[in-house]
Image (cartoon, rainbow, N blue to C red):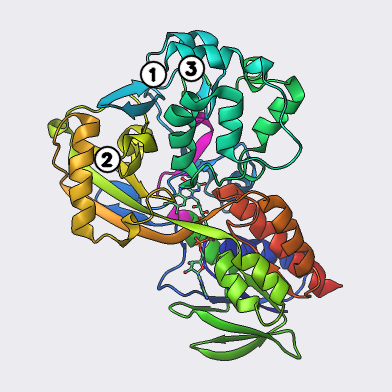
């Protein structure tokens, strides 16, 4: 069978890898052809190597509580090169507030404490906010429908917890406006906690999700390949055994044909038995709008947000004001352009070179959509001003690498889960067509790999039936 993979991000490449595996196991001959709009594979995965530094301009690690990315790493033979986060460092997350950095209390998990003592002792939250959190078990259960992250946190824990912790923590992960973000599609575990224990606080205290000494994110669950995230991309390109790889070749149209599917791109028209679209839901919606307008509209309705990542390298001997932790989040109430800073050289000392402090800064997101349109000089000037406020010193970077991600992160709106069920139901009518990517199951790399596995299974089933 001859299959087109459209889009060479982690999702599309994973679908190719697993389809190759399924066909090898079943002795089904497979010819895979890749079409990618940009000059290189990887999509938002972007590792930059400079001397002994391995810098990530896109994703820097993946979570292991969902199995698919780790399973893939094992499959690709790179398990031994995976390293953990923040070895030998305090796993604190700091909140910038009115000119000061406050550590989130140990055991604080995204929107609520799982340990009471550090929470009650911390200076970040007011006494009123702490009392409001202690009263959370008395808050009535929510309804059965979807709810925004903002509404859920405010309802259960009050406005201050949302403003100072949940908004910047979740805003940093999803780059989205939590008022528009579906809780069911992003963090359903909190809905389960509410249902199971009638209180998120009680459930978190009974089953603390963070490991010892962590606050904010569950750093202990993340892994990264020491040679860079791009090694996953390189290995996938090899294991898929593509017959041909077309870069700088956007697919501009897709049609049904006698054989199955006709792909139209700059390299001409070519027929395939099947096609896997891994191009972002908006682009897939455009490609499918003539073939199945309802499917096209469902896909085009998924909204995307933009962001900017800047990696700054400093000489350690000159850097002042580095906090003892792994990340800093900036609440939108502070009125700054910075959303978060990841203390990369503390998170991954093995990837950041010797004698360096490396900081990854995130700008933009849904609450600041203009940042992605600024030129590099504007971005640098904003960084200079705001980092001075955050670190308390005007540290001078020796190198700055900037990457803009225009409409690269899907925002899961209210009702997203139902909308995706409709899309997938509609897709099942089309033999030899599959979709995968960050827009369907989740934005993290494990979910992207999982979506690639599901796409590969659909094509395999469609073709052997
Ligand atoms: C800045 C940033 C940091 C992140 N950090 C993390 C992290 O640390 N951990 C984590 O788990 N997740 C992280 N994520 C999320 C995760 O990295 C992404 O969701 C995931 O990599 C998306 O992969 P994808 O293959 O679905 O899409 P993409 O990587 O966007 O790939 C889609 C590909 O399709 C191509 N394409 C588009 N249109 C066409 C067309 N018409 N024809 C041919 N090709 C086309 C594009 O050029 C692109 O290469 C991060 C995301 C961003 C943006």
> Residue 140, percent across and down?
71, 22
Residue tagged 3: 129
Depth order, front residue of 2/385: 385
Q: Residue at x 72, y 77 (%)?
A: 292
Q: Residue at x 32, y 55 (%)?
A: 371
Residue tagged 1: 124
Question: Which residues are the magenta region?
Answer: 216-231
Does mark 1 have its CB less than 8 Å from ligand 1? no
> Residue 223 magenta-drawn?
yes
Does mark 2 have its CB less than 8 Å from ligand 1? no
Mark 2 to mark 1 CA distance (whole Å): 26 Å
Which label sits on residue 389? Answer: none
> Residue 451 magenta-drawn?
no
Depth order, front residue of 357/329: 329
- The answer to which quarter of the image holds residue 92 is top left
Mark 3 burial class by Cα count in 10 Å: few <14, some 14-19, many 20+: some
Residue tagged 2: 358
Depth order, front residue of 283/313: 283
Residue 383 lies, with reference to residue 37, above or below; the image says: above
Q: How many marks?
A: 3
Residue 297 lies, with reference to residue 146, above or below; the image says: below
Pointer 2 or 3: first along the chain = 3
Pointer 2 or 1: first along the chain = 1
Mark 1 burial class by Cα count in 10 Å: few <14, some 14-19, many 20+: many
Q: Give left or right: position of 308 versus 114.
A: left
Mark 2 to mark 3 CA distance (whole Å): 34 Å
Residue 392 lies, with reference to residue 272, above or below; the image says: above
Mark 1 to mark 3 CA distance (whole Å): 10 Å
- Extreme residue in the right direction: 465
């Amino acid at each position: 069978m001859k299959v087109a993979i459209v889009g060479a991000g982690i999702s599309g490449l994973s679908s190719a890898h697993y389809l190759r595996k399924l066909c090898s196991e079943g002795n089904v001959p497979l010819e895979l052809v890749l079409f990618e709009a940009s000059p290189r594979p990887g999509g938002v995965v972007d590792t930059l190597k400079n001397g002994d530094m391995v810098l990530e301009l896109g994703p820097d690690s993946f979570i292991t509580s969902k199995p698919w990315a780790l399973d893939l790493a094992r499959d690709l033979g790179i398990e031994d090169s995976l390293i953990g986060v923040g070895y030998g460092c305090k796993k604190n997350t700091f909140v910038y507030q009115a000119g000061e950095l406050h550590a989130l209390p140990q055991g604080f998990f995204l929107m609520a404490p799982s340990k009471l003592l550090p929470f009650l002792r911390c200076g970040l939250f007011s006494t009123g906010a702490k009392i409001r959190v202690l009263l959370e078990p008395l808050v009535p259960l929510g309804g059965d429908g979807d709810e925004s992250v903002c509404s859920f946190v405010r309802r259960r824990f009050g406005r201050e917890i949302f403003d100072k912790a949940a908004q910047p923590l979740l805003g940093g992960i999803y780059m989205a406006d939590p008022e528009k973000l579906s809780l069911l599609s992003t963090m359903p575990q909190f809905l389960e906690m509410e249902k199971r224990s009638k209180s998120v606080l009680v459930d978190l205290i009974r089953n603390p999700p963070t490991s010892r000494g962590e606050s904010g994110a569950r750093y202990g669950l993340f892994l990264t390949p020491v040679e860079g995230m791009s090694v996953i991309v390189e290995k996938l390109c090899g294991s898929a055994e593509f017959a041909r790889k077309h870069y700088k070749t956007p697919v501009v149209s897709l049609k049904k044909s006698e054989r199955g599917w006709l792909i139209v791109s700059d390299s001409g028209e070519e027929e395939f038995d099947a096609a896997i679209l891994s191009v972002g839901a908006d682009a897939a919606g455009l490609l499918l709008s003539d073939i199945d307008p309802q499917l096209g509209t469902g896909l085009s309705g998924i909204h995307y947000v933009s962001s900017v990542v800047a990696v700054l390298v400093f000489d350690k001997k000159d850097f002042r004001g580095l906090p003892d932790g792994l990340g800093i989040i900036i609440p939108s109430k502070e009125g700054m352009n910075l959303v978060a800073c990841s203390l990369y050289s503390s998170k991954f000392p093995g990837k950041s070179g010797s004698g360096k402090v490396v900081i990854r800064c995130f700008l933009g997101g849904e609450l600041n959509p203009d940042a992605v349109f600024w030129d590099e000089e504007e971005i640098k000037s904003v960084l200079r001003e705001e980092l001075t406020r955050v670190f308390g010193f005007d540290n001078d970077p020796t190198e700055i690498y900037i990457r803009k991600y225009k409409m690269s992160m899907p925002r899961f709106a209210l009702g997203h889960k139902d909308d995706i069920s409709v899309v997938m139901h509609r897709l099942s009518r089309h033999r030899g067509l599959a979709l995968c990517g960050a827009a369907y199951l989740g934005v993290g790399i494990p979910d992207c790999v999982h979506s690639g596995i599901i796409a590969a299974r659909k094509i395999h089933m469609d073709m052997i039936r």
